Image: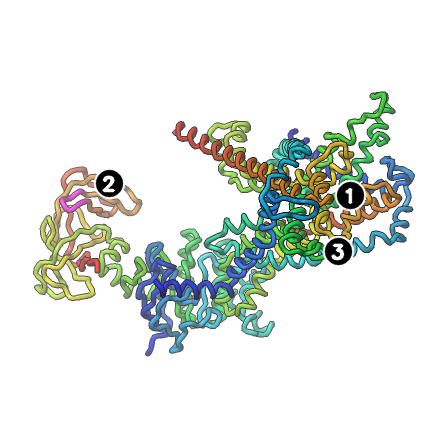
């Protein structure tokens, strides 16, 4: 036993010099440097703050304040905007990903779309949103054109500083987050599977519904997550296109932090995490249920 | 003359799994040895131990040309391997691939280009030096892998399932070619395969491995005709096997009798140890060595019923149910197909093999 | 026909960017209506000093983040596909920050280092938070290259007599190059345009996105200049992404 333990220990020490050992070492640094900060929100949110001093004693005060100041509604409002953006991206992204992975044959066209879907990750957040404000504004080209054509009598006010403007400003930049995961998951589906489905007499719609969509489901879920989460935290669109009439999550986080209400900010982060956790859990259960149901149907058929 | 390669007492384990157990072999210069065995028998692992890619947990002796190479890293060993999937460098051209072994040895550009071209010519690829690997067919890739290994002039060439990924026709052509190259260049080769026919036709000697152990090592005829264990017998195609006990031993030298539930049969003793009367033994014989019908040339007879006949082109395989179980008899397809019903199987006392049953030790 | 939606949304990304470029050479960009074309704003931009320091700062930080991403992605990306145990756990851990909204992540990084370690924000925290943001992307790019790398090639090189450093240089380096380049590009560009985390951890250091944001939210005379500045930066981004895609695409087909 002792010899075995000594052997294991010597192996562990030897591994520190190896690439695998260094990877685990880096993983440990990553855990302390990048992942532990995620826990701090949870910890601080149950502390009491008086003035600028954080008192290390347990309290639910931060959460009470959060509810009283209406921040929970802010989270829900932002979440509904993010959900809208995600669904629009899904509706547009699924066909595009399908086309890109299975239909498109022209190599340069595929690469062009790839580039188009890569660039948005690297655009300056202000630069990509700034112009929308000018375009949608009451003196902007859209209103001017509509007025000129006598389609409207007065400038459309809801074009700017509204949920509509925010969603419009967010759909574009985060669209690639939706397309890439779906594209990759569809790309991994063997063409033979689709051929087999067609061969068994399934029409294009049946193939899509019973073969392609279930197999692409992990990608679709990943796409929803990768869109929903960054949209939730976007600070530019609400600021430039929301006009400050309604508060969104990023505004709340910023204002709580600039007023140095750190326990408040921490509890807000915890609320967001809880919501994300519940949503992921729901998605996971839904996915499990769907695949279990499919297995059941297949068993019934066989 | 001392052997060129001498290995003995090799153990290898991956965690709790013992992959090689007390394996050894030796090889004379200019010899082609084929290691044969089912998948998972440890044959590729043995090759990787020789190449230096696996570190054995125990190794008694490992020498090449009299030099101890235990613990020597792969890049210092005077060996070259043709890998199962060739492992050609995808970012280099055919010529650069072949030159690589010379490049790392610091051979000058002109000299290594000349040698690479020579090797490619030897393998009938003289005008492919500038090609990319992706532009080659499977057979061509295999030849490039060969040229790349040859050019470093290794003392021993290791081939890991060299024909594994090729179709039947290409395989035959390459078999002849490898054999020709080996003879003309006087190369020493260890080849790993699970193809019985190519092993029999190409090798000077055969080694059969199973379950991580060396089961039998000898010339191809001996292993094909006189397998020393039931495992080797079945692997070499002696698919008709019965068990019994040895009868009287020593009446005719090299010949024994085995008593079974359905009478005694005479046959040659193929065990490694001397036969003992009453010892548990197996009898095994190739379907091609059996005949249908009573024949005075046969020393052994067995009655049964024809159950099924399947046509195989040149041969017909007749399945016969006997008191000792089902026997497969291969007869010429020119002869009329036997009728269903009673039949007698017979065979000569020179055919088949009788050997000891392995005891779980 | 269903593709129309997808292409419309793609257009929604590029129309504003295109308009930004057109407006940057228009006489009155703040009206949102192109026309009266002029290079006046570019001339002013060249004379203006205010954007230079943030630009330089962002470039420095992005270069550092890029270097860190290359080193870390190379280390982790090379070993991750070879690990027998812990693969799923490690991948999950490294990609987890992608599951946190940017502003929330910025806040948490700030609070963690401020209250647990008592550190003041600044240059270092920008580099750190940008690294945490960019590393998962760099890792994914590197994994595209390393997961299709055949370890048998290293055995083959060793077998032909190549010592370890030659295997690294002759075989791994050229075959992993697309992954290295994409890690470097992701590191640089994601850091160069990072805003939501920087809002919390900048500690008084002004980066280019922070400068842009401040300019875009206010109505000062600098606005036409940031049109020009961002047009130039966007052109560079597009060129760099195009190069990255071509490189990775070529690596993927080989």
Chain on which label 3 sits: C
Judge whether residue A173 is colored magenta. Answer: no
Which sits in the foreground, C89 or B250?
C89
Alpha-carbon distance for marks 2 and 1?
A: 81 Å
* Residue A81, x across and y down, in percent: 67, 32
From the image, which quarter does the C terminus of chain A lie in? top left
Span highlighted in magenta in the image: B321-325
Secondary structure at numbered mark 3 = helix
Which of the 4 image quarters holds residue C34? Answer: top right
Name the residue: 57% across, 40% down: A222
Name the residue: 74% across, 53% down: C203
Q: Is residue B264 left or right of residue A135?
A: left
Q: In this view, does C226 lie to the left or right of A44?
A: right
State whether discs 3 and 1 lie on one chain: no
- Which residue in the protein does label 2 denote? B309
- Which residue in the protein does label 1 denote? A127
Q: Does residue A151 appear anywhere in the picture?
A: yes
* Residue B176, x across and y down, in percent: 40, 61
Which sits in the foreground, A262 or A209?
A262
- Which residue in the protein does label 3 denote? C59
Secondary structure at numbered mark 1 = helix
Alpha-carbon distance for marks 2 and 3?
A: 81 Å
């Amino acid at each position: 036993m002792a010899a075995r333990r000594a052997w294991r220990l010597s192996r562990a020490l030897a591994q520190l010099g190896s690439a695998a050992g260094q990877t685990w070492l880096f993983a440990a640094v990553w855990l302390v440097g990048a992942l532990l900060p995620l826990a701090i929100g949870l910890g601080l949110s149950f502390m009491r703050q008086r003035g600028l001093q954080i008192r290390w004693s347990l309290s639910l005060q931060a959460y009470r304040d959060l509810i009283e100041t209406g921040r929970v509604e802010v989270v829900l409002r932002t979440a509904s905007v993010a959900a809208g953006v995600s669904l629009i991206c899904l509706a547009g992204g699924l066909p595009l990903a399908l086309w890109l992975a299975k239909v498109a044959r022209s190599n340069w066209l595929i690469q062009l779309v790839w580039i188009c879907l890569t660039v948005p990750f690297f655009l300056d957040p202000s630069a990509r949103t700034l112009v929308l404000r000018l375009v949608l504004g009451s003196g902007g080209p859209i209103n001017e054109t509509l007025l000129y054509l006598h389609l409207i009598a007065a400038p459309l006010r809801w074009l700017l500083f509204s949920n509509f403007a925010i969603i419009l400003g967010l759909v574009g930049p985060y669209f690639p987050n939706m397309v890439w995961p779906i594209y990759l998951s569809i790309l991994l589906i063997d063409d033979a599977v689709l051929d087999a489905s067609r061969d068994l007499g399934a029409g294009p719609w049946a193939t899509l519904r019973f073969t392609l969509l279930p197999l692409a489901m992990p990608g679709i879920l990943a796409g929803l997550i990768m869109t929903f989460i960054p949209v939730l935290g976007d600070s530019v669109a609400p600021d430039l296109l929301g006009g400050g009439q309604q508060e969104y999550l990023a505004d709340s986080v910023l204002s709580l932090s600039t007023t140095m209400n750190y326990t408040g900010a921490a509890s807000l982060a915890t609320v967001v995490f809880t919501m994300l956790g519940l949503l992921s859990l729901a998605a996971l259960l839904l996915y499990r249920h769907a695949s279990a149901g499919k297995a059941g149907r297949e068993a019934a058929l066989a | 003359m001392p052997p060129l390669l001498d290995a003995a007492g090799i153990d290898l384990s991956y965690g709790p799994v013992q992959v090689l157990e007390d394996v050894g072999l030796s090889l004379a210069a200019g010899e082609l040895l084929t290691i044969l065995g089912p998948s998972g028998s440890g044959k590729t692992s043995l090759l990787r131990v020789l190449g230096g890619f696996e570190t054995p947990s125990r190794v008694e002796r490992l020498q090449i040309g009299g030099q101890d190479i235990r613990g020597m890293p792969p890049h210092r060993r005077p060996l070259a391997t043709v890998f199962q999937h060739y492992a050609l460098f995808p970012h280099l051209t055919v010529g650069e691939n072949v030159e690589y072994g010379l490049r790392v040895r610091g051979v000058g550009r002109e000299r290594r280009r000349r040698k690479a071209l020579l090797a490619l010519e030897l393998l009938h690829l003289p005008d492919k030096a500038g090609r990319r690997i992706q532009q080659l067919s499977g057979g061509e890739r295999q030849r490039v892998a060969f040229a790349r290994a040859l050019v470093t002039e290794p003392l021993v060439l290791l081939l890991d399932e060299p024909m594994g990924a090729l179709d039947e026709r290409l395989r035959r052509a390459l078999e002849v070619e490898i054999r020709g190259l080996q003879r003309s260049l006087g190369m020493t080769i260890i080849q790993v395969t699970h193809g019985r026919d190519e092993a029999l036709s190409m090798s000077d000697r055969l080694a059969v491995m199973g379950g991580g152990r060396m089961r039998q090592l000898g010339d191809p005829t001996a292993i094909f005709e006189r397998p020393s264990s039931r495992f080797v017998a079945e692997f070499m195609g002696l698919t008709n096997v019965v068990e019994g006990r040895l009868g009287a031993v020593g009446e005719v030298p090299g010949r024994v009798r085995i008593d079974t539930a359905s009478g005694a049969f005479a046959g040659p003793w193929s065990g490694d140890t001397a036969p003992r009367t009453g010892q548990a033994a197996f009898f095994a014989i190739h379907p091609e060595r059996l005949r249908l019908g009573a024949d005075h040339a046969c020393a052994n007879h067995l009655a049964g019923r024809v159950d099924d006949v399947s046509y195989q082109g040149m041969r017909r395989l007749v399945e016969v149910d006997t008191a000792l179980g089902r026997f497969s008899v291969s007869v010429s397809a020119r002869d009329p197909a036997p009728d269903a019903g009673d039949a007698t199987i017979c065979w000569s006392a020179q055919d088949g093999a009788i050997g000891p049953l392995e005891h779980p030790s | 026909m269903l593709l129309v939606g997808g292409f419309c949304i793609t257009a929604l990304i590029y129309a504003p960017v295109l308009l930004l470029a057109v407006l940057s050479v228009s006489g009155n960009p703040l009206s949102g209506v192109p026309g009266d074309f002029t290079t006046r704003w570019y001339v002013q931009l060249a004379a203006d000093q205010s954007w230079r320091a943030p630009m330089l700062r962002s470039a420095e930080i992005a270069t550092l983040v890029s270097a860190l991403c290359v080193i870390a992605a190379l280390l982790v990306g090379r070993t991750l596909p070879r690990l027998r145990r812990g693969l799923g756990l490690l991948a999950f851990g490294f990609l987890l920050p992608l599951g946190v909204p940017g502003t929330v992540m910025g806040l948490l990084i700030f609070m963690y280092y401020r209250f647990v370690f008592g550190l003041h924000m600044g240059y270092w925290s920008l580099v750190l938070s940008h690294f945490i943001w960019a590393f998962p992307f760099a890792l994914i790019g590197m994994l595209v290259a390393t997961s299709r790398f055949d370890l048998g090639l290293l055995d083959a090189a060793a077998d032909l007599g190549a010592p370890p450093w030659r295997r690294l240089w002759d075989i791994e380096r050229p075959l992993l190059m697309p992954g290295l380049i994409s890690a470097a590009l992701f590191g640089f560009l994601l850091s160069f345009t990072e805003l939501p985390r920087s809002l919390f951890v900048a500690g008084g250091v002004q980066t280019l996105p922070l400068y842009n944001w401040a300019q875009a939210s206010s109505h000062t005379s600098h606005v036409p200049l940031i049109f020009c500045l961002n047009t130039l930066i966007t052109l560079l981004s597009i060129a760099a992404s195009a190069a990255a895609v071509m490189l990775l695409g070529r690596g993927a087909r080989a």
